[in-house]
Image (cartoon, helix red, strand yellow):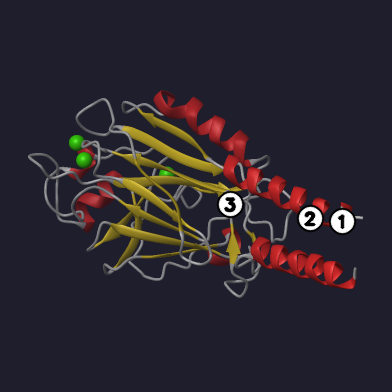
Amino acid sequence: MLLPVRLVFSFAAISLSTLAAAAPITFSAGGDGSAASIQSTVDSFRLALGTPSNGDAPGPLAGGRREINWDGGGSTNTTAAITPFNTFLDTRGVQLSTPGTGLSQATPDGLEGLFSNPTYGETFGPFSSARLLVPVGSNITDVLFFLPGSNGAVAATVSGFGAVFTDVDLANSTTIALFDAYGNSLYSASVEAGTVADGSLSFLGVVFNGGERIARARITTGNSALGPNDGVGVDVVAMDDFIYGEPLAAVPAPGTLALLGLGLAGFAAAWRRER
Ligand SMILES: [Ca+2]
Ligand SMILES: [Ca+2]
Ligand SMILES: [Ca+2]
């Protein structure tokens, strides 16, 4: 009559082995100035996240992904630097922020005006026409996820996150770090450098296969805020397309498995006392 206890133990063993197998699946490329040089990596990441791209549709949706290309339907205007950046909070379920003065969407030529630097039109190039996203006064961008259609009322998590970068010159200057809803680190890695001196494109995307859920991404672009010329130890970097899993309402799960385990252990102890 020990069978129930044995069942409890085997359940725990299966759960632990599932957790041990969990791993990030990385999609990484460093290319030249052509979109084609990173396209297949970006498309593979899209497939891994899910189809279709859900556009501005309100959630919750069962599958698919979200994308932001910063292009405003073909606009070439430079947008004012704002933080928090809530432009896509309701429609795509992200809130961006920076410790700097704000985030702006601009074309490479627009960045010349924004930062009073006439070299930036050559330094940067877009993946999707024509605008990029940059933090102003910082090289840090934080990304929080919300249920699309909730206008920031419902915190959410995603299964994967990736971004396109332009003009990554140094191997360890640009990073993506991912955190769960409790601030625990899930992943951190550097974006590959491009293969040409200026205007290169790079991509880094990560999706998890063990049920991990991303609540926040911290992106570090280059080793300097935009402003100075690129080169001679200064690596300024801008961002293009963000691509991420469909945001789903965050489910409170602090040690849910552990609590479940405690409950089963309690049940087993009670069962033994009953005998
Ligand atoms: Ca773009
Ligand atoms: Ca460069
Ligand atoms: Ca650079």
**Relative depth, front residue between 11 and 99:** 11
Q: Is mark 3 within 8 Å of ligand 1?
A: no
Viewport quadrant of the N terminus: bottom right
259 relative position to 217: left or right: right
Residue 229 placement (x, y as % from top left): 11, 46
Quadrant in the rendering for residue 190: top left
Residue at image coords 61%, 47%:
19
| C-alpha gap between disc 3 and disc 2 | 24 Å
The image's mark for residue 114 is none
Amino acid under label 1? Pro
Residue at image coords 26%, 38%:
168
Q: Is residue 178 above or below residue 209?
A: below
Residue 16 placement (x, y as % from top left): 64, 48
| C-alpha gap between disc 2 and disc 1 | 6 Å
Amino acid under label 3? Glu
Q: Is residue 128 visible?
A: no
- Dot 1 lies on which element? helix
**Relative depth, front residue between 75 and 171:** 171
Mark 3 highlights which residue?
212
Q: Is residue 89 visible?
A: yes
Mark 2 highlights which residue?
8
* Ligand 3: quadrant of the figure: top left
Task: Please report contact status of discs 2 and 1: CB closer than 8 Å, yes or no.
Answer: yes
The image's mark for residue 4 is 1
185 relative position to 246: left or right: left
Viewport quadrant of the C terminus: bottom right
